[in-house]
Amino acid sequence: MKKSIIAIATIITLLFSANNIQAKAIDTTNKVVEASQLQSVYDSYFAVKDALIKSDSKLTSAKASTLLTAINAVKMDKLKSNEHTVWMKVVKKLTADAKSIAATTDLKKQRETFKSLSKNTYALIKVSNPDQPIYKQYCPMADADWLSKEKAVKNPYYGSSMLTCGNVVETIK
């Protein structure tokens, strides 16, 4: 009888443990889904920035088209409350900026529009609690900010002519 009670207690413990592990796995999956809603927008933004650093207007245009696709793919109902609030404020401008950059191969126009794109992406990423630090950088010559995953300054507004012009003004964690 003692062995039966121990066996039953062990089975009950295992069942509770398995249920707890499953609940944690579901919670983790939901967090991944929430994070991925905007992650493709951020990744596409960084690709546009990198193309501007290279001063490649055709690549910039192509990456902006990818950004537009990422913006259109966001499911607003899957966003966290604070992200949804900011998203509603910036989505039209993000869309217009991505369309504008994609529609031209004039590097000067692309860089000018990138200022607005960066400002609105900053507002969104600020409330998103990114997985890694994001650096807001500033170029005094262009009087404009941009976002970077790297702390080292690589200026998208002037490319190779003034690649390291600027400084980190904020770290978003």
Image (cartoon, rainbow, N blue to C red):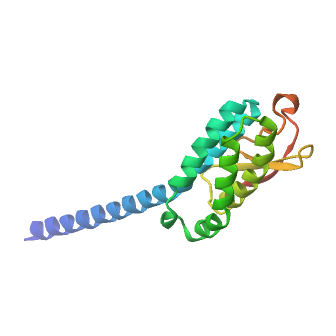
Q: Residue at x 81, y 32 (%)?
A: 159
Decide if residue 122 is on the left or right side of residue 37.
Answer: right
Report whether residue 146 is seen. Answer: no
Residue beneath the point at 18% across and 64% down: 11
Above or below residue 113? Residue 33 is below
Left or right for 75, reference 10: right
The answer to which of 145 and 96 lies nearer the viewer is 96
Residue 42 visible at all: yes
- Farthest right residue in view: 141
The picture places residue 73, in percent across and down from the top left corner, at 50, 53
x then y, percent, for residue 49: 71, 40
Is residue 132 toward the left or the right of residue 118 in the image? left
Choose between 78 and 130: the one closer to the eye: 78
Image position, residue 125 (x, y; %): 66, 57
Quarter holding the N terminus is: bottom left
**Res 87 → quadrant:** bottom right
Q: Quadrant of the C terminus?
A: bottom right
